[in-house]
């Protein structure tokens, strides 16, 4: 890093929340007690604006010049973060960076100081790169689950997976050349120049951060000490999430020319159906079938549906063994016709 004059930095923190009041109140209190809200600290004061997008429309917060609460319909994390982007764009403040952060994380305030100080010194092409926040296991505080991710067409690999940082951890140490393509939105910082021109795809949940990072096309920078604690993926899985985890990766791979051969897609889909069929988990089986059916409707369909209303409709779905048996054969026929196999 060069010794050039320190760059001006102003951060916009974009948080989408839904029924997570305890986390929001606790994290907001920590941020508002930081140097970013201390008028006596000229270096940090006023350099962090917090935008909380409440998809549940129930938070009661006192707003000020640096804390903004926006009620939003429940359009999922994707729609909530997108609303945050829109609010940030129209704010009078000139922001240099936007941080996307989950509502249910735990963090140390040093994360924001380390990131802010780094952004004030970084120069050259590195100014245009995102910074990926490390994710630590909520139930094992010294275990880093991941530092950043590589998509691999959906076969995700993690940088420094399950690293024990009990020793040898150096806050502030910067890694520029990790084998990664994007950072998860438990905590990820993008230059405002990119955010200004790029919207979030309406995936509702899951893979929005993947696609956004791939679209950015710049390898994320990783900094020790820029981190959050968060529950790992396996602890948050539900039947409905299987719908999004089946559908959305197909859209991402289609966008970036990473779709496998049609026969491979069909085989993987059938294997997943079989997995839930054997368990007699008819509702999850149904969601997996429907996910491929909706993917076949195309990107134009995805961009024009009301994702919030569609999510509610999905949540009301009911199924049974017989219904699924008819449905998957119908979807397979449609798939074979479209992909000509």
Image (cartoon, rainbow, N blue to C red):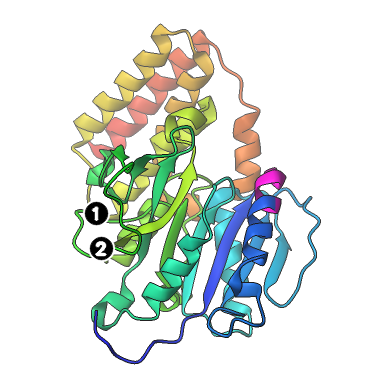
Q: CA distance from mark 1 to mark 2?
A: 6 Å
Proximity of marks 1 and 2: CB atoms separated by less than 8 Å? yes
Residue drawn 20% across the image and 30% down it: 263
Residue drawn 33% across the image and 66% down it: 216
Residue 337 makes an appearance in the image: yes
Q: Secondary structure at mark 1?
A: loop
Q: Residues within 10 Å of mark 2 (few under 14, many from 20)?
A: many
> Residue 160: which quarter of the image?
top left
The boundaries of the magenta stretch are 18-25
Q: Position of residue 274 (x, y in %)?
A: 35, 14
Q: Position of residue 77 (x, y in %)?
A: 56, 50
Residue drawn 53% across the image and 19% down it: 283
Q: Mark 1 vs mark 2: which is more N-terminal?
A: 1
Q: Secondary structure at mark 2?
A: loop
Please identify the dominant SS of the magenta region: helix
Nearer to the camera, 177 or 55 = 177
Give the labeled residue for mark 2.
Answer: 219
Give the labeled residue for mark 1.
Answer: 180
Nearer to the camera, 131 or 301 = 131
Q: Does the segment drawn in magenta span residue 48?
A: no
The count of marks equals 2
């Amino acid at each position: 890093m060069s010794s050039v004059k320190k760059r001006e930095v102003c951060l916009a923190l974009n948080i989408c929340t839904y029924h997570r009041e305890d986390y929001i109140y606790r994290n907001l209190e920590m941020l508002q007690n930081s140097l970013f809200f201390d008028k006596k600290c000229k270096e940090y004061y006023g350099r962090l604006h917090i935008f909380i997008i409440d998809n549940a429309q129930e938070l009661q917060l006192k707003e000020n010049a640096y804390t903004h609460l926006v009620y939003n319909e429940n359009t999922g994390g994707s729609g909530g973060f997108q609303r945050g982007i829109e609010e940030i764009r129209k704010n009078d403040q000139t922001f240099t960076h936007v941080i996307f952060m989950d509502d249910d994380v735990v963090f140390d305030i040093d994360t924001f100081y380390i990131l802010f100080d780094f952004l004030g010194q970084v120069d050259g092409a590195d100014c245009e790169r995102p910074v990926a926040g490390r994710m630590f296991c909520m139930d094992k505080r010294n275990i880093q689950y991941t530092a950043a991710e590589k998509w691999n067409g959906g076969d995700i690999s993690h940088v420094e997976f399950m690293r024990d940082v009990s020793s040898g951890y150096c806050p502030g140490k910067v890694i520029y050349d990790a084998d990664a393509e994007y950072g998860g939105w438990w905590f990820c910082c993008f230059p405002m120049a990119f955010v200004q021109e790029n919207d979030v795809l309406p995936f509702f949940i899951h893979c929005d951060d993947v696609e956004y990072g791939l679209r950015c096309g710049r390898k994320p920078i990783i900094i020790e000490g820029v981190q959050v604690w968060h529950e790992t993926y396996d602890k948050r899985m539900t039947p409905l999430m299987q719908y999004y985890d089946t559908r959305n990766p197909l859209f991402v791979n289609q966008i970036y020319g990473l779709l496998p051969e049609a026969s491979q897609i069909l085989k993987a889909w059938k294997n997943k159906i079989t997995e839930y069929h054997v368990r007699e988990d008819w509702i999850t089986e149904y969601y997996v079938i429907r996910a491929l059916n909706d993917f076949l409707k195309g990107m134009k369909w995805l961009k024009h549906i009301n994702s919030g209303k569609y999510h509610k409709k999905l949540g009301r779905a009911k199924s049974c063994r017989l219904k699924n048996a008819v449905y998957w054969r119908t979807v397979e026929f449609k798939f074979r016709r479209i992909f000509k196999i």
